[in-house]
Amino acid sequence: MPPPGWINAAHLHSVKILGTIITEWNDGAEIWKELLKNDDNIALFVSKLTQLCVYFGFDGWLLNIENKVDETVGNIRKLVTLVDRLTKSMHEALPNSLVIWYDSVTLPGGQLIWQNELNSKNQEFFDCCDGIFLNYNWDEEGLTRSKTNAGDRYHDVFVGVDVFGRGCYGGGGFNTYKALEVARKHDLSAAIFAHGWVYEKFGAKNFLPLEYCFWNRVLPYLYLHGPSELPFKTSFCQGNGLKKYQFGKEVSSTPWYNLSLQQHQPSSGSCFHLAVLPSENQVVKYEKDNHGCMEMYMDDAFCGG
């Protein structure tokens, strides 16, 4: 389940946030044997997943089943039934909720064979939920077929983009935008995986400018939306700070972190642009453009940090 701070920050920006049901390997296969054993188990599982969303205030589930499903007792058909029931249960409890299927287990045999496109082996799952998250090793021909197979629901096809670049178009990293560009060319949606790559690869030093460099490159391919009502106020606090301020006065001199206190963030381009891409873990060079751009200042604040 997403942490409360993530839920609050997402909803502040009118962004839906999902929990993830993920199972893997032999342990995962055994879990699904139990869940799909009978109708009572399916009904209880669907009910509890729905209750969790309602109680904790998040918006649905990503179903990521990374193990084969035993077909000897017809479990793959039962899994389709479960996805259908979960989607209907979620929509009844939370009309704007989402249930998304990850491109993994296939019909008719319950094998774990990533398709990297929407086709006859995963179409039934797509048809009974709100969308499909494609695996990352796609090509343009597969995206063309996916759009055709989705019919008028082509925006419910989320093209998987791995920022670590493992077999993904464009190689990921600071070239992640190349995969997004192709997804948009085919009028499909996108699912960016592992955008914590910047911190994981380069660490804390120079994190913010490099993070801005990453998002500047993908910004043209994102669908942005923000507040549309007045009054509107924000100090652009990111939910953390070196100190804490209230109406321009310092109220705490210690570093803090609380995403539930994040305020609305700008979507304009950052002042940081890459001049020379980083090499290994060393930032070779980045440059700053001070014309019509935004830069986060952490040494002072009006409210927050």
Image (cartoon, helix red, strand yellow):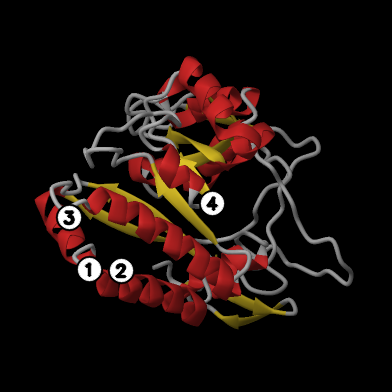
Residue 168 in the image, given as x and y percentages of width and height: 39, 25
Q: Which mark is residue 130?
A: 4
Q: Quadrant of residue 265?
A: bottom right
Q: What residue type is labelled 3?
A: Gly
Q: Is residue 206 visible?
A: no
Label 4 packing within 10 angstroms: few (<14), some (14-19), many (20+):
some
Q: Which of marks 1 and 3 is in front?
A: 1
Q: Which amino acid does label 4 sit on?
A: Asp
Q: Nearer the viewer, mark 4 or mark 2?
A: 2
Q: Quadrant of residue 228?
A: bottom right
Left or right, 175 with reference to 288: left
Q: Can residue 234 be seen in this view?
A: yes
Q: In which quarter of the image is residue 103?
A: top left
Residue 10 in the image, given as x and y percentages of width and height: 58, 63
The residue at 76%/56% (across/down) is: 226
Dots 1, 2 in contact, CB < 8 A? yes
Name the residue beneath numbered marker 3.
Answer: 28
Q: Which of marks 4 and 1 is in front?
A: 1
Dots 1, 3 in contact, CB < 8 A? no
Name the residue beneath numbered marker 1.
Answer: 38
Q: Is residue 47 above or below residue 282?
A: below
